[in-house]
Image: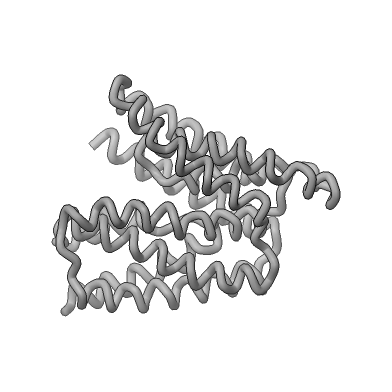
Amino acid sequence: MVITAVAGVITFIFTTLLTIAGVGAAFILIPVFIGLGIDIYMAMATALLLNSVAMIFASYRFIQKKLILWRVAVPILIVATVLSPLGAYVSKGLDRELLLWLFVGFLLFAAGMMLFYEPRKKETEAEKTGQMAYGLAVGGFAGFLGGLLGVGGGNFIVPVLVWLGYDPKKASATTSFIVIFSSFSGFLGHASLGNISLPLLGFTAIASALGAVAGAWLMTDKLNRKQVKLIIGIVLLGIAAKMVWNLLS
C-alpha cells in the first residue's frame, strides 16, 4: 500500500508538469515505478495507460478553450500511425545506441530553440491553409523517428510545431490529444506481456487525472506563451539528461 501511495504522489507531480508541456509522463513514470519494485512490464503498461487517462482529461479542457489544431492533429495521427512501424523495421539494421545519441542531440537543439528562439507568429489565414500539410509532414517525421528510436513521438511534435510558428499553447494542446492514441496503442502492446495491478492502476489513475486537470488549468489560465515555451524547453532538457544517464550507466 505504501508503494502504491508513493507511486500516486509521484504520478500527480509529474503529470501536472508534463501536461503543461503536452508530453506524457510515461517516460519518467516507467523508471520510477521500476525503482519502486514494480515489475517492468506492469510498470510500462500502467504508465502508458496513465498517459492516455491524463491526456483525455487535459484534452477536454483544451477543446473547451479551442486550443487543439484539428487540421494538424488528425493528419499527424494518421501518418504517424502508418510510418511508426516502418521506423521500427528500419531500426533493426541500425546501431540503437548511435540513434539514441542522435536523438539526445535533437532534444538539446529543440530545448535551446524553446528557450531562446522566438518564431514569427503566423497570420491566421496562412496558418489555416497550411495546417493539413504541416500535419502530414510533422506526422511523418514524428511517426518514423518515434518508431525508429522507440520513444514517444510527442517529444518531436511540440518543438517542431513551435518552430513552424504555432503558438506554444496550441502546439502543446494538439500534441496532448495525439498522445491519447499513441500511448493507448503502446499500452495494448505491453499489457499482453504483464499483469495489471488494479490497486496500483486505480490509485495512480486518479492521481493522473487530477494532475492533468491541474496542469491543463495552469497552461490555459495561469501561464503565458513564453512561460509555456520555457517549461517545454526545461522538460526537453530533462528528457535529454535522462537519456544520457541511461546511455552512460
Q: Position of residue 237 (x, y in %)?
A: 48, 45
Q: As displayed, is residue 149 above or below residue 198?
A: above
* Residue in the picture at 70% in, 58% down: 225
Dividing the image into 4 quarters, which one contains the N terminus? bottom left
Q: Is residue 41 left or right of residue 135?
A: left
104 is higher (above) or lower (below) than 56 = above
Residue displayed at 68% across by 71% down: 65
Picture layout, residue 207 above or below residue 225 = below
Q: How is the image coloured?
A: one colour
At x 55%, y 67%, the residue is: 59
Give the x, y percent position of residue 73: 60, 52
Is 33 situated left or right of 144 in this image? left
Q: Is residue 206 left or right of 191 when viewed as pictured?
A: right
Taking the image as drawn, is residue 245 in sight?
Answer: yes
Q: Depth check: 99 or 101 in front?
A: 99
Q: Is residue 222 visible?
A: no
Left or right: 154, with 193 as reference point: right
Q: Position of residue 138 (x, y in %)?
A: 59, 39
Rendered residue at 32%/21% (across/down):
94
Quarter that holds the C terminus: top left
* Residue 61 found in image quarter: bottom right
In this rendering, the count of numbered labels is 0
Residue 91 in the image, given as x and y percentages of width and height: 34, 27
